[in-house]
Image (cartoon, coloured by chain):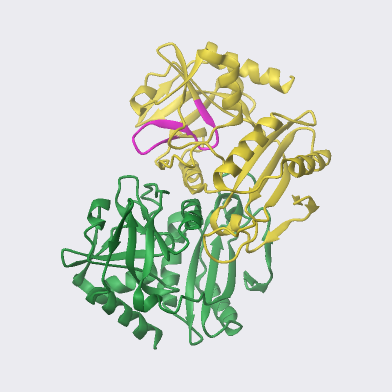
Chain colours: A yellow, B green
Amino acid sequence: MLVNGQTSDSIPANDRGLAYGDGLFETIRIAAGRLLFAEAHLERLSHGAAVLGIPCDHAAIRGWMETALAQAPAEGVLKLVLTRGPGGRGYRPPEAAQPTCVISCHPLPELPATLLERGGQAFLCRQRLAHQGVLAGIKHLNRLEQVLASQEFATHHEAFEGLMLDQENRVVEGTRSNLFMVLDGRWQTPALTRCGIRGILRQHLLEHFGGRLEEADIPLARLHEAEELFVANSVFGVVPLTRLELDGKVLECAIGPFTQAAMARFREVLGA
Amino acid sequence: MLVNGQTSDSIPANDRGLAYGDGLFETIRIAAGRLLFAEAHLERLSHGAAVLGIPCDHAAIRGWMETALAQAPAEGVLKLVLTRGPGGRGYRPPEAAQPTCVISCHPLPELPATLLERGGQAFLCRQRLAHQGVLAGIKHLNRLEQVLASQEFATHHEAFEGLMLDQENRVVEGTRSNLFMVLDGRWQTPALTRCGIRGILRQHLLEHFGGRLEEADIPLARLHEAEELFVANSVFGVVPLTRLELDGKVLECAIGPFTQAAMARFREVLGA
C-alpha cells in the first residue's frame, strides 16, 4: 500500500477521511497490466475534489498510481482514496489542507462461471438513498447507505446485486454498480441528479451509445415492465440481470440486444 | 492517542471508518477531571452501533476512556471514534468485524469572553441536510454535509453557528449543535426524525425540562418569529443566539427565561 507515495499500511488516526468521511475514492480495473479508463477516473476524482474543496495534485497522484501498478497483478483492481488529510477536532476544514492519498492493489474478484451466460439475480434493497444534490454523482467516502444495503445480501444469498430506490420510489442504481434497462424498446439508465454515483463505465456507455442510451427518472412501477436489465461497474464490467425479486413477485428478463451490445463493448475495452 | 487501548497515532489504512465512514463518534466534555454525561454518550454509541451492526464492547471502551482521562487536561474534550475496523475492498461488512476504537483528548476550545452575556450571531447555511430516517439521530462518521456547511463560515466570520435546514425548509440544527427556541411562548427544539444528531445535552435538557420543552417540526418561516434562540452541545454547553441573519434580514432575540434556565442547568451540571 502507498500513502502519499510512501510504502505504508497506516494513516494518521486524526485523518479527516476517518473523522468525517471527508474524501473521495476510485476503484480502477487493472487489465493486462494497464489501468482501464485511468483518465476518466482521474477526472471524476478531480471533479469530486473541486466539489469538496480538497486539493488534488494530478501529477503526483498519476505518479503514485504508476508506482503501485508496477507492483500489482496484471489482472486486478487499484483502489485510490483521497482525503482532506489530518485535521484537528471540528468539522471546519483547515485553511491549508494536506491531503492523504492511499493507493492499494487487490486481486480481481472472481465471478461465478455461468454469470455472463445465464445472468444474475437481483433483489430490491429496503435501504433507500437520500436526496442530496450537492453530493450526487461523486464517489465520496460517506457510504453508510451502501454499507447498510449490502448487509441485506445476508438474506439474499443467491443475488448478484441489490437495487436501490430513492426517497420517492425511483430506482437509482445497484449497491456497487449502475443500472441499465430496456423499457418500451428504449435503452435507459437512471438519472443521477438527486443521488447515486456516476460510474465510469456508465459514462463510457453513455458516450459509446450516444443518443441510443438515455438518462431518465425511472419509477419503481416501471421496473416491472423492463424487457432487459443489466448492471455495470468498472471492475466486473457488464452483468446481465435475468431474475429480479420485486415485492414477492419474480421478474424474468432476457439477455437482449442492448445487454449484448454493452457486454461486447466492455470486451472490446478490455482488449479481450 | 489510544487505538484499541494501545498508545498509537495511526490506524490501518484499510479501516472501514476511512473507506466508507463506517463508524460512529462521541465528543465528551471533560470538566474538573471527569467525563460529563459519560453514560449517556456510551448509550448513544451503543444505539448507533446496533443500527449499523458494529460490535460495541462497553467494558473495554469504558476502560480505555478511563486510561485516556488519566492523561487528559482537567478541562477539555475526549473524542471517541468507533469503526467497524479493517476490511477488504467492498461495501459488505466482514462476518466478524474487529472494531477500531480511537480515543484522543483535546484542550477545551475557548469561547469569546462576552459570548454568554451578549449572545452569539448565527446565519442560515445554504447546505441542506438530506432525509435519511435510518441514520437520523445517530452520530455516525458520514459528515460531509456538516463539513460543507462549515465551509460557509468563511463568508460569515462573526458567526458563532450556522443553522441547517432539511430538504423541505424545516430548521433542524446547527452545524455542530442542537437548536432551541421559544415560539408563541412555547419552548421548542426541532424533531430529529428525518435528519440531525440527537445531542447528549439536548437529550438532557428534554429530560430536565420535562413537558415544558417539546420536540416539533419547525418550518423556516416560523424561525422569523422566534422570541429566544440558543444552541447547545456537550462541549460548549448553552450559547444564546441574539442575532440571526435570515434571507438578508436580521432577527434579534433576547436572552429570555428559557435560555437563562438552560444556561443555569448547564452550570449546575458542570458543578460550577
Q: How many marks?
A: 0
What is the x, y in percent for residue A60?
Answer: 76, 44
What is the x, y in percent for residue B184?
Answer: 16, 63
Viewer can see residue A109: no
Indicate the quadrant where residue A262 lies: top right
Would you say residue B181 sits in the magenta stretch? no
What is the x, y in percent for residue B115?
Answer: 40, 75
Q: Nearer the viewer, residue B160 or B248?
A: B248
Indicate the quadrant where residue A13 lies: bottom right
Identify the residue at the far left of this view: B184
Indicate the quadrant where residue A115 lies: top right
Q: Could you tell whether A27 is left or right of B34 in the image?
A: right
Q: Nearer the viewer, residue A121 or A234?
A: A234
Would you say residue A166 sits in the magenta stretch? yes
Identify the residue at the far right of this view: A70
Q: Nearer the viewer, residue B105 or A128?
A: B105
The residue drawn where x is 74% and y is 56% is A9
Q: Nearer the viewer, residue A189 or B256?
A: B256
Viewer can see residue A76: yes
Q: Quadrant of the C terminus of chain A?
A: top right
What is the x, y in percent for residue A24?
Answer: 60, 45
Q: What span is in magenta?
A: A164-179
The residue drawn where x is 44% and y is 13% is A186
Check the image and report above or below for B132 versus A238.
below
